[in-house]
Amino acid sequence: MRALPTGTVTFLFTDVEGSTKLLHELGAERYAEALLEHRRVLREAFERHGGVEVDTQGDAFFVAFPTPPGALAAAAQACDALELGRIRVRIGIHTGAPLLTDEGYVGSDVHKGARIAAAGHGGQVLVSSATAAFLEAEKSVLLDLGEHRLKDLSAPERIYQAGHGDFPPLKTLYQTNLPVPATSFLGRERELAEIGALLERQDLRLLTLTGPGGTGKTRLALQAAAAASERYPDGVFWVPLAPLRDPALVTSQAAQALGASDGLAEYVADRRLLLVLDNLEHLIKAADDLARLLPACPNLELLVTSREVLRIPGEQVYPVPPLAPQEGTALFLTRARAADPTFAPSPAADELCARLDNLPLALELAAARVTVLSPEQLLERLSTRLDLLKAGRGVDPHQQTLRVTIEWSHELLNEDEMQLFAALAVFRGGCTIEAAEDVCGADLDVLQSLVDKSLVRRNEGRFWMLETIRQFADEQLAGSPREDEVRRRLAAAMLALAREAKSHLVAGDQEEWLRRIEAEMDNIRAALEWALVEHHDREVGRELASSLGRFWWARAPREGLAWLERVLEQPDLPLAERASALDIGGGCAWFLGDHVRARRLFEQSLALYRELGDREGIGMLLTRLAPPLIVAGRHEEAEALAAEAVAIQRDLGNTSELPLSLHILGSVALERGDWTTAADLLEESLGLAREAGDAWMVAGDSYQLAEAALQRGDPQSAWSAAREGLAVSHGLGDQLTALICLGFLAAAAAQGGERRLAGLLWGAAERLDEDLGESMWRRERRQVEERLTQRGADFEQGVEEGRELGLDEAVALALDRVEPDGA
């Protein structure tokens, strides 16, 4: 057998597509013959082009080539030879510089090559971007398939197809928010197979991975979820729960991960998806909510990580063991070489891993120290501590091992590192370098040292800690002289962010600021809890909750209302702050579709602003109160309030509030059938909103102008207006307004004679309406349906097809048409 190539190596992986089905079709004897022929053909192609067989398992090959062109030529020859046979082989090719050991190749390049092959279909040859870079002469036969997320959870990988055959979409992750880990996943083949088998069971819908901190529950859950993604056509979504403190927020956090603006059960409905609820142990009271969720959503499955079992009906528990000895050693060696490329293993490494119970986190912490300590020195320094600790009783021995490892790593820090390590625990959601400097007084060199020692991690521009380490760091912070100062600084930093965001959330860069606030949401919650729940600084908490008004309305009205209710519970709340909190809380209730509650809160706020003589506040609340009055059928009152609001805003020169006041007055004109006045008011509002860059207002004005145009019998103008509203609202991530715009586009298409297009858009709107649940659209829907006359067979066929469209597909369909053909 020839020696395996070293240095830059190109891996080729093959797998037979549909082998089980083929076995049943051909029978055992004929299938065995076909398999032998397939092996002969492949081996002949590999040998001819310089390939060395690394491993063969069942009907799969793993082959190493010294050059990328050789691997590509072998793949082409193999596919040509198998083209007329029954066996179809998918092939993946990837180039890297793996480590060659006595056991074979080690490193992430091996896993990436296998994952690329698994993404393909029979007869298809997939090539990684790393390999494609070496194939300049063969570029003409490479088809760029774009970027794809592989099931090893690596960052998006650009994949090419050799040849130009037609194949189904690649089997990669698409509907998911699973994070991209900072390091490669190693080992755990047995556990992945067992968890995968459990997820395949039809009778099992709740699987809980248990074990002490540091056993790798999260990484294993994420990897298993990614591997099983094909079973969930509606997606696989990760819900990180470690930063939360209130069990009542678990389902709303899950709803936000899915992009649902209403309740979780209403959004999921009959969708087939998997939720990964990560770190549930401190929120175990939420188990009752999960027990009610599963019967309401017949196709939903839950994969939970927790140190404690949930103990609810239908739960299957899977205790996550430490790594197998050889896996533990492999992990230690890989991480050690990442820290020190010259690191050479010694017999002490195996013993060290065994003494650390092969716990992944403990191994990573130890590996980070090889730059200054040999495995022998690490073993010597840890042994006495471990023996002493394991003499205790009543605590999981693995948990003891991990804790002593973290303690040992902590005690090796110098004073500056210890102080920063403790202070960083204040960030539940990680932080930027600027936030670490501002809140914790971080020195860049000290922060880098903590990263080098694996106590802090860095990913996508943010610094963060594994939750087990963060909890230990939080223990160091608790009761320390700096604790109050650091927590106060975090609250001040989050308040400064909210203050700065306030004006941007009504300006042209509102989408960027919505994302910025979302990124800090866990830290904002920590600040709100410190200020309002623990009563450390109620003034900061009150202003923080109220300053996030537009964010609550657009992204999390249910949670926003809960925080505002806490603010309103304070008996000594100044009148101006109470008026503001009632205003923001009323807006949250409005966007939740609770119009009665919204009206009550707005009325209370308006009364307080009148008592204070605050004309700006009065103008705002007159505007806010009009829509609930319209819903209640009190049109004359609503028009009087909106007209007064417009007069106040014009008098004050308040251009930030005037567009909304004009919008509401225009809406009342629509209600009473004065289409010309309505259009004039809405056009003025739209012009001001565009000038201010308030995209949210632009979208609202656009769909109301579409309604006015439809009433005037002008489907072309209606289409143009609703199309702009859809583009803007979709760009903002505002699904509710996008839904309304889709409805008006359907009506415009129908009025213009494009019945199938109207049906497609209406079907997509119906599906999105079901996903969002109860909302303000329900009222608008009745008005739009009045325009969908003379539906016919084309319309109904379109509806059926449209219900299969995702929101992105429906938006692309609408935006691709400047106007409906019949307009």
Image: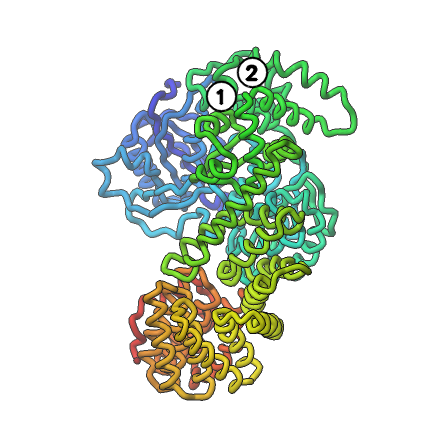
**Taking the image as drawn, is residue 494 in sight?**
yes
Outermost residue, left direction? 137
Report the side of 358 relative to 18 (left or right). Answer: right
Q: Which kind of residue does numbered mark 2 sit on?
A: Ala
Q: Earlier along the polypeptide chain: callout 2 or callout 1? A: 1
Q: Nearer the viewer, mark 2 or mark 1?
A: 1
Vertical relation: 733 (above or below) 490:
below
Please tell me which residue lies in front, 509 or 541.
541
The N terminus: image quadrant: top left
**Residue 160's image quarter?**
top left
The residue lying at 61 percent from left, 41 percent from top is 195
Instruction: Point out residue 498 in the picture as x, y percentages from the top left corner.
Output: 49, 53
Disc 2 is placed on an element classified as helix
Please tell me which residue lies in front, 697 or 22.
697
Instruction: Point out residue 716 in the picture as x, y percentages from the top left corner.
Output: 31, 79
The residue lying at 40 percent from left, 53 percent from top is 512
Q: Which kind of residue does numbered mark 1 sit on?
A: Ala
The residue lying at 52 percent from left, 14 percent from top is 373
- Circle number at residue 349: 2
**Taking the image as drawn, is residue 115 in sight?**
no
Disc 1 is placed on an element classified as helix
Q: Is label 2 in contact with label 1 (beta carbons under 8 Å)? A: yes
Please tell me which residue lies in front, 577 or 750.
577
Rate crowding at label 2 as few (under 14), some (14 to 19) or many (20 or more) other CA atoms within 10 Å. Answer: many
Q: Which residue is mark 1?
A: 336
Instruction: Point out residue 665 in the picture as x, y percentages from the top left corner.
Output: 44, 80
Vertical relation: 413 (above or below) 508:
above
